[in-house]
Image: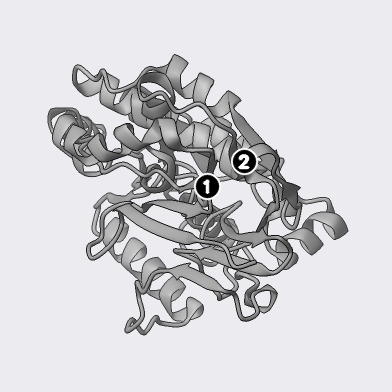
Amino acid sequence: MTSIIKLHALSGARDESPPCYMLQVDEFRFLLDCGWDEDFSMDFVKDLRRAAPQVDAVLLSYPDHLHLGALPYLVGKGDLNCPIYATVPVYKMGQMFMYDLYQSRHNSQDFNKFTLDDVDVAFDKIIQLEYSQSIVLKGKGHGLQITPVPAGHMIGGTIWKILKDGEEEIIYAIDYNHKKERHLNGCQLDTISRPSVLITDSFNALYNQLGRRQRDEQLMTTILQTMRNDGNVLVAVDTAGRMLELAQLMDQMWRNSESGLTAYSLALLNNVSFNVVEFAKSQVEWMSDKLMRTFEGQRNNPFQLKHVRLCHNLAELAKVPEPKKGKRNEYIKEMEKSKRERLRREPEGVMLFSVCTRQA
């Protein structure tokens, strides 16, 4: 029997706003992601809050605020009370994103959209899944089955397969990456075959990306040129998503004694940097085949970062060694002065490459 399928875009259609969609299959309603914009606009979640009590299940694709940022608010203040499904890394790293985001806002303004308790309560509702682990829904969801498959892009990133009565297949696939990356495999497009409904996006459809080696060389060249001119390199990164690849790449570069980088310090600054790296160490099985082979063969964890100094605030960052203390102090003062504006633009954290004493 053919199902009645309806899709309503609460956000993430016809513009670059965070994805949030209501998918109705007969009488069952899925909320597909629940991102929030960086300004935490109440107008942005107005329709979402009204719809929250009708939601029967939430499917989360990625751990960043653009895909689950509204979850603590909806659970704490929006009457969202239903099962929430995500992969293990989306659960763990999603918490880190929201802790960091809350703390960054709380440190710079009177932030009351949600609390850390709201974050904890929301994530306690998440049912953690492995890739290819199918869940058969019950009650109103009788006849429905959901399965997460790899999407690439971020650790735990998910393409959702929704199967109705073993016949009609609905695919929810956004922000996926089909290419292998340094720390992740690409998405598994071969698991998708002639679905009844495909929900996807068209970002980067016309974008021609440089090869990985060329991108790495350009980054390394820019870093070296800047620091040899007594400069500092500040790179805006997220909390626990794309940052992982960059941290691993930078640590590898610093390990190479011929790179010329070992004379300089490397620091990662966000409120939860230690926890993020510890979680990454414990989730190698969710990463690329190459990293897995390295870990299994050499028992060398790719996120045992030897050169990245983990900082949680500007005071810790100020202690990172650098010969020109006057210049460092001026730099830290400037960061503090512009902290509110910087956090508004880049709420997730920064990676800093700074000049330090040359080694003998």
Contact (Cβ within 8 Å) of mark 1 with mark 2: yes
Secondary element under disc 2, as helix, strand or loop, is helix
Quadrant housing the N terminus? bottom right
Residue drawn at (26%, 54%) of the image: 17
Residue 138 visible in image = yes
Q: Which residue is mark 2?
A: 140
* 91 w.r.t. 154: above or below: above
- Classed neighbour count for the residue bearing mark 2: other residues with Cα under 10 Å, few (<14), some (14–19), many (≥20): few
**Where does the image place residue 272, in percent across and percent down from the top left?**
48, 29
Name the kind of residue labelled 1 in the image.
Glu
Picture quadrant where residue 321 is located: top left
CA distance separating discs 1 and 2: 7 Å
**Where does the image place residue 77, in percent across and percent down from the top left?**
35, 20
Picture quadrant where residue 40 is located: top left
Name the kind of residue labelled 2 in the image.
Lys
**Where does the image place residue 9, in percent across and percent down from the top left?**
33, 55
In the current view of this chain or complex, which residue is farthest to the front? 1
Residue drawn at (50%, 71%) of the image: 198
Q: Which residue is mark 1?
A: 27
